[in-house]
Image (cartoon, rainbow, N blue to C red):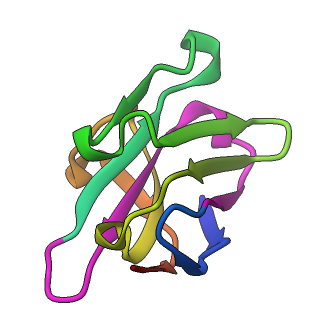
Amino acid sequence: VQLQASGGGLVQAGDSLRLSCAASGRTYSTYGMGWFRQAPGKEREFVAAIGWSWSGGVTNYLDSVKGRFTISRDDAKNTVYLQMNSLKPEDTGFYYCAAGRGAYATSDEYDYWGQGTLVTVSS
């Protein structure tokens, strides 16, 4: 599986962005999909994940983004999205999508990673 993330940019606090992650490969629908981020000088952290559609697409979120971010997937388009609303400066960082074994919050559960897309939120 190859992953291509896009949609990052420079926005002001309170604005919204939608990130997309396009996946290649016919087995995309069998993977759980996740988003992670890494701010300058910090470790990579889990943001959101979504399980397989056929099992209900269970979602999992970092506490600090609950109610502001929404992860979704469109298996017909082999794409996972991260809708980010009410953005805060602390949301700044490179955002990476990943494909793995389910809607897990640990990076070890993901086998494939895309390149990052930069999100910068100014105050």
Residue under the point 53% across and 37% down: 31
Q: Please tell me whether residue 35 is drawn above or below residue 40 in the rendered image.
A: above
Q: Specify the quadrant that holds the C terminus.
A: bottom left
* Residue 90, position as x, y percentages in the image: 28, 69
Is residue 4 rendered magenta in the image?
A: no
* Residue 61, position as x, y percentages in the image: 34, 37
Residue under the point 47% across and 20% down: 58
Q: Give the range drawn in magenta.
A: 16-43
Q: Please tell me whether residue 36 is drawn above or below residue 106 in the rendered image.
A: below
Residue at the far top in the pictured view: 55
* Residue 105, position as x, y percentages in the image: 25, 41
Residue under the point 38% across and 64% down: 88
- Direction from residue 110 to residue 23 in the image, left or right: right
- Direction from residue 42 to residue 2 in the image, left or right: right
**75, 46: nearer the viewer:** 46
* Residue 3, position as x, y percentages in the image: 61, 65
Q: Specify the quadrant that holds the N terminus.
A: bottom right
Residue under the point 36% across and 60% down: 36
Q: How many marks?
A: 0
Residue at the far left in the pictured view: 42
- Direction from residue 63 to residue 88 in the image, left or right: right
Q: In which quarter of the image is residue 104?
A: top left
Q: In which quarter of the image is residue 89?
A: bottom left
Is residue 17 rendered magenta in the image?
A: yes
Q: Quadrant of residue 75?
A: top right
**62, 111: nearer the viewer:** 62
Q: Please tell me whether residue 22 is drawn above or below residue 92 in the rendered image.
A: above
